[in-house]
Image (cartoon, grey):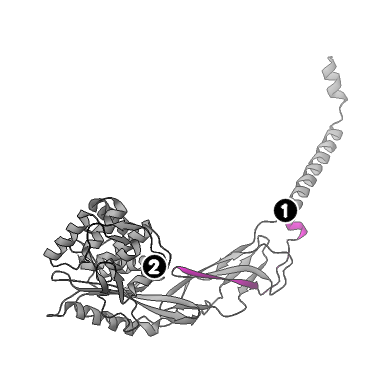
Amino acid sequence: MSDNQKLYKSIDPKAIFVLVIILFIIGLAIIGIVRFNSPIPDIDATTSAQNIVLPGQFSVAFPDQAQSAIGTDTFGVIASSPDQNPVPIASVAKIMTAYLVLKAHPLQPGEDGPTLTMTDQDVAGYQSAIEKNYSRLPVTAGEELTERQLLEGLLLPSGNNIADTLGRWVAGSDEAFIAKMNDTAKSLGMTNTHYADASGANEATVSNAVDQIKIAQAAMQDPVFREIVAMPDATLPLAGKVYNVNWMLGKHGIVGIKTGSTTKAGGCFVSAAPVVNGSEKHYIIAAVLGSKKANRNLQSALEANARILDEVRPQFKSYTLTPPENGFGQITTPWHSQSDLQVSQPIQVFGYPGMKVSYFINPLAIKLPAAPGTDVATLTVQTGKTSQTVSMQNTEKINPPGFFWKIFR
């Protein structure tokens, strides 16, 4: 018999079994200790609904002819007339031109910006505008104009030649600037817009009312743009005193934005009117394109636009948010402790009838147990481009996990 065989016969099977049991128990104990001391999983929060709808229904009567749309600087497009085919927009195109100038060369209120010296090419553009009877701003070779003055010449007397001058300054050439305009339109979701020039004189520059709300919404974020389009007049070196061709400025609460009119385009007007809600100022934006009435195309667009603003303005106000039927949501733990969530005070939002208000809940890191009324989560309410966040409290006590849950989780 070999030594290995003798050793095997000498081992007691019962001792081996006991040893295995002991090792198994030790293993379980180690696993239990590890699990017991492992971090507690994060608490989760669920919402009762995807959004809350403000009471009522938004109402607006758009003009019978022409195409129209309404929105705000923070909510985007809210409503529009049925026919939204691309149409010529005339000088309304200069909203995009000014927007791109201020994106490339930002100004702060009170700043004049860089100075540009007018060239023979700029003078030729002015002479061409005279020949074609386009809106224009007088310039002479060697004249120096600041960025601010050029924007005033673009947006107040609506100088077509200034649109071309600014476009070449931003992009290097007319063609490069037009490409930039169209790329920007695409990035803003302006799917029915095509720019063929910087001024809108080209009838191939087309858009619709919905798209013009989108570019106006973007442009109105800039305080200098808002400041200039609200100016009734300005004094420039060679031209002297120039006046804003927006005849509605200061009426019906209108503080901008841009008019446009040609035989092909008819009367076009994109307007802005402020609505104050506490310490906040919002801007209603209305667009009317292609208004055509005998000898009063532009006037008809201005009047139709003002009627839209007057109708919708009272509908923009502060609302107290009514929670969903089952409350805003619940907080739950992996060990099956849960509680409904509440807010300590009513939530006020600025909006309009029928607007959808989205919200989401984020749980906080809390010390357990958490008595009722503890700040255990935050509620973020989103309305357009603005949001507010408030604390949420539990309505039921949230206990820590028990001994056996920690061991056997």
How many residues crowd mark 2 within 10 Å: few (<14), some (14–19), many (20+)? many
User: What kind of element bears circle 1?
Assistant: helix
- Range of the magenta residues? 383-405
Query: Would residue 341 appear left or right of 228 to someone viewing this image?
Result: right
Query: Would residue 76 appear left or right of 404 to someone viewing this image?
Result: left
Magenta-colored stretch includes residue 384: yes
Q: Which residue is rendered at x = 81% and y = 39% of the image?
A: 23
The C terminus: image quadrant? bottom right
The N terminus: image quadrant? top right
Q: Which amino acid type corresponds to the residue marked 2 in the rendered image? A: Val
Q: Which residue is rendered at x = 25% and y = 61% of the image?
A: 163
Q: Which residue is the site of mark 2? A: 224
Q: Which residue is the site of mark 1? A: 408
| x and y, in percent, of residue 194 in the image | 23, 59
Q: Earlier in the sequence, mark 1 or mark 2?
A: 2
Q: Are marks 1 and 2 in contact (CB under 8 Å)?
A: no
Q: Which residue is rendered at x = 67% and y = 62% of the image?
A: 365
Q: Hey, which quadrant is residue 329 in on the image?
A: bottom right
Q: Considering depth in this image, is 21 or 54 the residue closer to the camera?
A: 54
Q: Which residue is rendered at x = 73% and y = 63% of the image?
A: 400
Q: Considering depth in this image, is 194 or 150 the residue closer to the camera?
A: 150
